[in-house]
Image (tube, coloured by chain):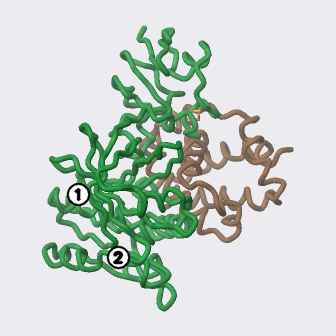
Chain colours: A green, B brown
Amino acid sequence: MPTVTFEGRSYPTEPGETVLTALLRQGGAIPHSCRSGVCRSCLVRATQGTPPASSQKALKDTLRAQGYFLSCIAQPESELTVALPSDGVIGHTRAQLLAREQLAPDIFRLRLQAEEAFPFMAGQFITIRRPDGLRRSYSLAAPPTSDGTIELHVRRLPQGQLSGWLCEALELGAWVDLFGPEGSCFYLPDDPTRPLLLIGTGTGLAPLLGIVRDALAQGHTGPIQLFHGSRHPDGLYLQGELAALTVTHPNLTYTLCTSATGPRADVAAFGAIPDTSGWRVYLCGNPEMVKGAQRKAFLLGASLAEIYTDPFVRAG
Amino acid sequence: MSTLYERLGGEAAVDLAVDKFYRRVLADDRISAFFEGVDMERQAAKQKAFLTMVFGGPHHYTGKDMRDGHRHLVARGLNDSHFDAVVEDLGATLKELGIPDSDIAEVAALAETTRNDVLDR
Ligand code: FES
C-alpha cells in the first residue's frame, strides 16, 4: 500500500484507508470534521504525487490544478507527499526589490525579482515576511515573466507596519522573503469564449489586472468586463494603462466607480449584467463587497463553482 | 428495477440540481434569513450531501449529524413551517428539471424522514 509523507514523516496506509484516516491513526494532525467529503476542513495539497481524481472532484478547477484534494475521501493510489494549505511548505523564495512607483496618494506598485524560478498564476497571492517575522499577503498583478519579475500593488495604510516598510523604508536592491503562491483566483484557459466579469475595490484591482493580462495573453476572445471601485477618486489607479488595454483589446471593457458620488462597483456591474448565467466571475477586495456580490452573482444565474473570490482582510 | 438515485441520474443529477435548489432556497423569503452570512461554498457542499441522501444515493450523514448541524438554527426559531418550505423548494427544483411526479414524491418522502432530526426533537 502506498505511503503518505507529511511534515517529513512517512505514514503507511492500510488497504481501503483514506489519507486522513491513515494520518490520524498514526498521530498526524490534519483538521477535519465530517469525514465524508462535505465540509472541506480536511483540505490538503499534494506537493508530490497525484491524488485520486475523486478526491478533487468537488473542488474548483483552480484548486485542483494546484494539487489540492480532500484527504477524508482520498484512498491513495500511489506515493503522496502532502502539506496543509497554510503551513508555508507551499513555496518559499527570496526576492529583490527592483522598482517602486507611486500610482495614487497611498498606492504603490512594487516590482520584485525572484531569486529562483517561482511558479505562480497571476491573481494568486504571496506572503511577504519582514526580518522580524511580520507577514502580509499581496496579490500578483501580472503573469510570470521570463526574467522572473513579480508585480504587486501595495496600499500604504495609516498605521500599516508592513505596508509602510514596503512603500517607504525598504531600499531598492534589498531582499525580502516570499511564501506562496496561494489562492484560487486566476484565469483558466478552458474556454476562451466564456464571458468574464471582474469586480474589485481598492487594490483588489491587482489580482483582477493579473487575470485580465493573463486572459488577454492567452488569447481570450469572449467579453471581459472589469469594474474597479473605490470610495474616493484617490483610490483609483492605473486608469491610463487600463484604458490603453481596452483600445488594443476590444473585448475588454473597463468601468470606474466612485461610491462617494455614484454607484458601487458591484451595483454598477450587476446593473450592466442582469443575467450572469454562463459568466465566470472574479471578486476581490473589500470582504463585504465580495460576500454580497458572490450572493448576487449566484442569484442572477452564475454557477457557484464559477464564482472566484478573494476577500482582502485589512491588516497593514 | 433501478434505484431512485439511478433513475434520477446519480451524481450528475445531484450536481445539476444543487445550484438550482440552493438558488431557490436563497431567494425564498420564508427561509433565506437562515442562510445570511454563511460560507456559500460550504453551504452548497452540504446541500449536495443532502440531495444525495434524499435522492436515495450513497451518503454518510447520520441523524446525529443532522441534529448537530441544525441545532443553532432551531435556537433561532427554525420550525416545521421552514422545513415545509425547503421541501417545497426541493419539489419545485425537481419539477424544473423535468423529474416525474412519482419520483418527486419518493424524494419528498425521504426528505420527510429527516424532519425530527433537523428540528432536534
Ligand atoms: S472532513 Fe469534511 S470534507 Fe473531509
Task: Give the residue drawn at x 40%, y 48%.
Answer: A126
The residue most toward the bottom is A261
Can you tell which of label 2 and label 1 is closer to the viewer?
2
For the C terminus of chain A, the quadrant is bottom right
Residue A145 position, x and y percent, is 19, 50
Circle 2 is placed at which residue position?
A: A237
Residue A245 or residue B34, whichever sits in front: A245
Q: Depth check: A163 or A266 in front?
A: A163
Quadrant of residue B91 in the image?
A: bottom right
Q: Where is residue A248 drawn, in percent x and y?
A: 13, 74
Residue lying at 41% horizontally and 41% vertically, measured from the top left = A179
Q: Is residue A55 visible?
A: yes
Image height check: is A75 above or below A59? above
Which badge, 2 or 1, is on the more N-terminal residue? 1
Q: Residue furthest right?
A: B121
Pick the residue in front: B109 or B52.
B52
Relative to A171, A248 lies left or right = left
Q: Quadrant of the N terminus of chain A?
A: top left
Q: Percent position (x, y) of residue A140? A: 34, 55
Which element type, helix, strand or loop, lies under badge 1? helix
Q: Residues within 10 Å of mark 1 (few under 14, many from 20)?
A: many
Residue count near mark 2 (Cα–Cα under 10 Å), binned few <14, some 14–19, many ≥20: many
Q: Answer yes or no: is residue A187 visible.
A: no
SS state under label 2: loop
Residue drawn at x 46%, y 76% is A266
Same subunit, labels 2 and 1: the answer reads yes
Question: Residue A193: x percent and y percent?
Answer: 21, 62
Judging by the rendered image, the residue that carries numbered circle 1 is A214
* Amino acid on which the number 2 mark rests in the picture: Tyr
* Foreground residue among A45 and A98: A98
